[in-house]
Image: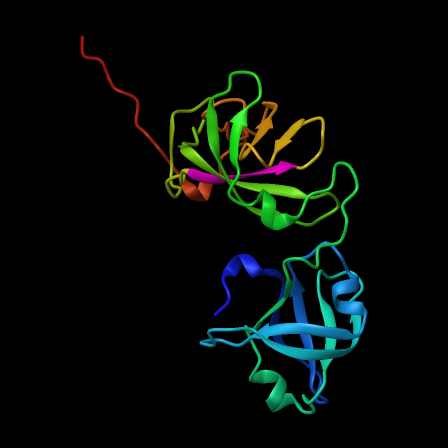
Amino acid sequence: MTSPADWIEIGKIVGPQGLQGQLKVYPSSDFPERFLEPGTRWLQRRGQREPEPIELTYGRDIPGKNLFVIEIDGIEDRDEAEALRDAVLYVPSDDRPELEEGEFHVMDLIGLVALNHETGDQIGVVTDVMSSASDLLSIELDTPIVPQDTSSSKRRLRRKQKPLKPQTHVLIPFVEAIVPIVDVAGGCVRIVPVPGLIDDRSVTIREEEPDPAETEEIPEEISGS
C-alpha cells in the first residue's frame, strides 16, 4: 500500500464533456503539460484506496476557463465519463518538473503559517492557491475580521440590514512585494501588511445614502418645559 507522500495530485475530474467520453478536469498543477501530453497518469476513483494507472491519449485547455478537456483510453461514452466524476488524477511524487527560482509547488505552499512580516505575529494558515490574473494565497485567519459599519446620514436612521458576518479568510496577491519570504523548509510565509487586506482587525463599510425603503426614521425626543 502506498502513502499520500508517494503521489502529487494534479487535478480533479469535474464531469463529462460532450458525448464521446471526454472529461473536464480542474487542475491543481501549474504545469499544463500534465494534461496536454499523452502518457501514463494515475487515477483514484471515489472510495478507491489506491490510484490506478490510466493512459491519457489527448488533452486541451478550455480558453478563458481554468479547465482542461482530456481523453482516457477505454472511456468512450458519456456514462463512462460520468462515472469518473470527482475522481482525482495523480503523478508519482518523483515526477516533479524542475522549478525555476521563485517558483513553488502548490502542495508545498498549502499548510504554511502566514506571519506578519513586520511584527512576526501569526496571521493564519495558507489553505489554497487560487489562479487569476495573478496567483492568490487564500489564508484562513487565526482571528476573524469583524466588519464595522461606519455608514451615517444627516438624519438619525436605523438601517434595516443583515448583520455583517466576520471574515474568516483573506486573499493575498502572491507577489514578492507582498509576500517577500516563502520559507517552505521553515513552514511559513511572511506577508507585508497592506491597507485594506490585513493591516488591521476591522473592515470599513463604504458610506452611502440609505435606501428610504430600507430605513425608518427614529423620532426626535420632545423635551418638556
Residue 153 visible (yes or no): no
- The vertical placement of 208 against 43, above or below, is above
Residue 185 position, x and y percent, is 58, 35
| Residue 169 lies in the magenta-colored region | yes
Q: Residue furthest top?
A: 225
Which residue is more in the foreground, 151 or 93?
Answer: 93
Please provide percent x and percent y for residue 216: 36, 37
Query: Is 62 displayed left or right of 207 in the figure?
Result: right
Q: Is residue 80 magenta?
A: no
Residue at the image point whose x is 77% and y is 60% from the top? 32
Work out which residue is located at the far left of the displayed protein and give it. Answer: 225
Magenta stretch secondary structure, dominant: strand
Q: Position of residue 20 (x, y in %)?
A: 73, 89
Residue, far front: 1
Name which residue lies at 73% across and 41% down.
103
**Start-end of magenta stretch:** 167-173
Identified at 60% across, 72% down, the residue is: 14
Q: Does any portion of residue 185 appear in the rendered image?
A: yes
User: Residue 213's image quarter?
Assistant: top left
The C terminus lies in quadrant: top left
Q: Eyeballing the image, is 178 above or below 45?
A: above
**Snapshot colouring:** rainbow
Q: Nearer the viewer, residue 173 or 59?
A: 59
Residue 175: name its quadrant: top right
- Decide: is 74 above or below 43: below
Residue 142 is situated, as x and y percent measured from the top left of the image, at: 41, 34
Q: Is residue 20 left or right of residue 143?
A: right
